[in-house]
Image (spheres, rainbow, N blue to C red):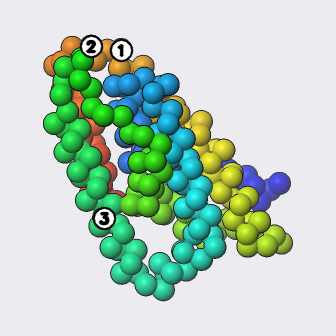
Amino acid sequence: MHELLPLLTYCTLMSGTPGPNNMMLVASGAHHGYRRTLPAILGINAGGAVQTFVTCLGLGALFLAWPALHAALKLAGTAYMLVLAWKLAGAPAAQDRPPARVRFVEAALFQAVNPKSWIKAITIASVFMPVGLGIVEGAVLVSLVGALVGFPCISMWALFGACIGRFLKSPRRRRVFNAIMAVSLAVLALLLLR
């Protein structure tokens, strides 16, 4: 039990702190509400669980052996986040045309280029793999823990977005919100590039 507490704490911190997933969920929650953002939440969780599982099975070792591969993935992730920021900044402010929703598959696949998700998966694989279990069983366990802890943490961000969405009824407020979220995502992308 004492070995599970550090993993739970780490997963809570990684899932609950600002990052590309959570910025995307705030924006989606504000524009579409929690219920319509739920597929993105589930996609993030599923993609993160698969990513953690695969990393625990050895992909993390591959990145450690070939840092250039990890660097290339980090660049691709940063570029994708900058494109998302650009699209969000240019999203229509009219009430009848909110930006497109992020779907389950898109959110799941986004984890492959999300630098924060890779940091989480590699750290779990290298620090939190349980001793005494087989590799597959350990990978399943830590992946499930990450998904179970992650769901309520990232849901809070979508709920926050849904709450502030009520104050974004005017096109002007929506434009300001979209600009703030776009700048936040762009800054975050550049910080993760370091």
- Marks 3/1 in contact by CB < 8 Å: the verdict is no
Residue under label 1, please give it: 166
Label 3 and label 2: CA atoms lie apart by 34 Å
The amino acid type of the residue labelled 2 equals Lys
- Residue at position x 50%, y 36% in the image: 39
Q: Earlier in the sequence, mark 3 or mark 1?
A: 3
Circle 1 — which element?
loop
- Residue at position x 21%, y 14% in the image: 170
- Residue at position x 43%, y 84% in the image: 66
- Marks 1/2 in contact by CB < 8 Å: the verdict is yes
The amino acid type of the residue labelled 3 equals Ala
Q: Earlier in the sequence, mark 3 or mark 2?
A: 3
Label 3 and label 1: CA atoms lie apart by 34 Å
Horizontal and vertical percent position of residue 53: 62, 64
Q: From the viewer's perspective, is 32 left or right of 183?
A: right
Residue under label 3, please give it: 76
Q: From the viewer's perspective, is 138 left or right of 194?
A: right
Q: Kindly identify which numbered label has been placed on residue 144.
A: none
The amino acid type of the residue labelled 1 equals Arg
- Residue at position x 28%, y 56% in the image: 80
Instruction: Please name whichever residue, 100 or 160, is drawn nearer the observer in this view of the structure.
Output: 100
Circle 3 — which element?
helix
Quadrant housing residue 166: top left
State which quarter of the image contains the N terminus: bottom right
For discs 3 and 1, the disc positioned in front in the rendered view = 3
Is residue 79 in view from this perspective? yes
Q: Residues within 10 Å of mark 2 (few under 14, many from 20)?
A: some
Residue under label 2, please give it: 169
Instruction: Please name whichever residue, 126 or 6, is drawn nearer the observer in this view of the structure.
Output: 126
